[in-house]
């Protein structure tokens, strides 16, 4: 298989209604580069797209975000992986030039992710997550410390859209499949930083993100989020720290 410059990798789950717009918008901004688009479908129902140039892998079950993306990465031929949520859209015209920011120092690069009102999406990036930052963020909320900065070094960026060289992604072992949903992006960024690279958020490139289109039940969303948060703290700090976090949450959320 001939190498492509970019592999656009998308996991679909309950998102077919927004996926078609995402695919159409990718086509508009990628003509300058050789590319491929591959979709991993986590719905039980087979996904059939109008655009037959898009490769679809029908998993026939919800394998989780990280595992489905690893399946995509295993079949992708691009030198750079651009991971996208199916509800991303309206990329700026030169969006694909973002891959040129990847270098020997910058391992992951992400654009500014905007909500449909054009404002920077809360929690689309942040400082390296620890027990302390979780407690601090719960008290003070989201802080946009990269506001309008063209290039900003951060601790993590959202899995909704970011790019990474295929070689680096494979070298660090891809996404940790123990994270079913949430924190797989935070964990990946932490391992990229541990390998000696920076995580970059740039205001030069922008994308809109609907958000929450694949999951309607907030209670289930919270369950997955807190479970993954516990796993992350346990993995990178200690089981005791994870238990402490669980106790703090129980005391403050009841």
Image (spheres, rainbow, N blue to C red):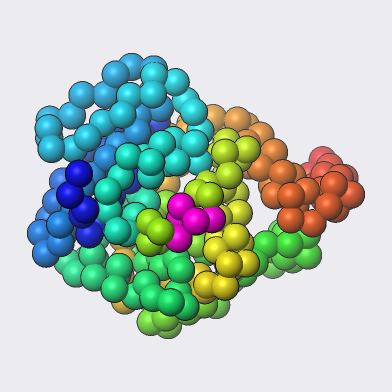
Q: Residue at x 20, y 44 (%)?
A: 1
**In this picture, is 47 found above or below 120?**
above
Residue 134 within the magenta-colored segment of the rendering: no
Residue 251: give x, y in percent of width and height. 87, 46
Q: In the figure, is residue 116 to the left or right of 139? A: left
Q: In the figure, is residue 93 to the left or right of 210? A: left
Residue 250: give x, y in percent of width and height. 84, 42
Whether residue 87 is visible to the viewer of this picture, yes or no, is: no
Residue 144: give x, y in percent of width and height. 53, 73
Q: Residue at x 60, y 30 (%)?
A: 220
Q: In the figure, is residue 45 to the left or right of 154? A: left
**In this picture, is 112 found above or below 216?**
below
Whether residue 253 is visible to the viewer of this picture, yes or no, is: yes
Q: Would you identify the image quadrant in which residue 188 lies?
A: bottom right
Residue 33: give x, y in percent of width and height. 15, 62
Specify the quadrant that holds the C terminus: top right
Prevailing secondary structure of the magenta residues: helix
Q: In the figure, is residue 218 to the left or right of 27? A: right
Which residue is more in the foreground, 110 or 9? 9
Which residue is more in the foreground, 3 or 52? 3
- For the record, the magenta segment spans 168-172
């Amino acid at each position: 298989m001939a190498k492509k410059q970019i592999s656009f990798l998308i996991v679909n789950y309950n998102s077919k209604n927004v996926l078609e717009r995402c695919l159409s918008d990718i086509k508009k901004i990628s003509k300058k580069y050789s590319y491929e688009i591959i979709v991993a479908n986590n719905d039980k129902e087979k996904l059939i797209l109008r655009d037959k140039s898009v490769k679809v892998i029908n998993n026939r079950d919800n394998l989780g975000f990280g595992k489905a993306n690893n399946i995509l990465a295993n079949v992708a031929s691009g030198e750079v992986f651009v991971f996208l949520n199916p509800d991303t859209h309206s990329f700026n015209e030169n969006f694909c030039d973002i891959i040129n920011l990847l270098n020997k120092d910058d391992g992951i690069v992400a654009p500014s992710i905007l909500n449909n009102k054009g404002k920077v999406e809360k929690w689309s990036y942040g400082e390296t997550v620890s027990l302390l930052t979780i407690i601090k963020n719960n008290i003070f909320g989201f802080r946009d410390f990269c506001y309008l900065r063209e290039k900003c070094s951060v601790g993590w960026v959202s899995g909704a859209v970011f790019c990474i060289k295929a070689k680096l992604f494979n070298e660090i072992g891809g996404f940790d499949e123990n994270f079913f949903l949430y924190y797989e992006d935070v964990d990946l960024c932490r391992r990229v930083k541990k390998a000696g690279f920076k995580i970059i958020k740039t205001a030069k490139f922008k994308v809109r993100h609907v958000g929450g289109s694949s999951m309607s039940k907030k209670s289930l969303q919270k369950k997955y989020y807190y479970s993954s948060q516990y796993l992350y703290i346990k993995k990178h700090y200690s089981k005791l720290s994870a238990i402490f976090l669980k106790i703090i949450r129980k005391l403050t959320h009841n």
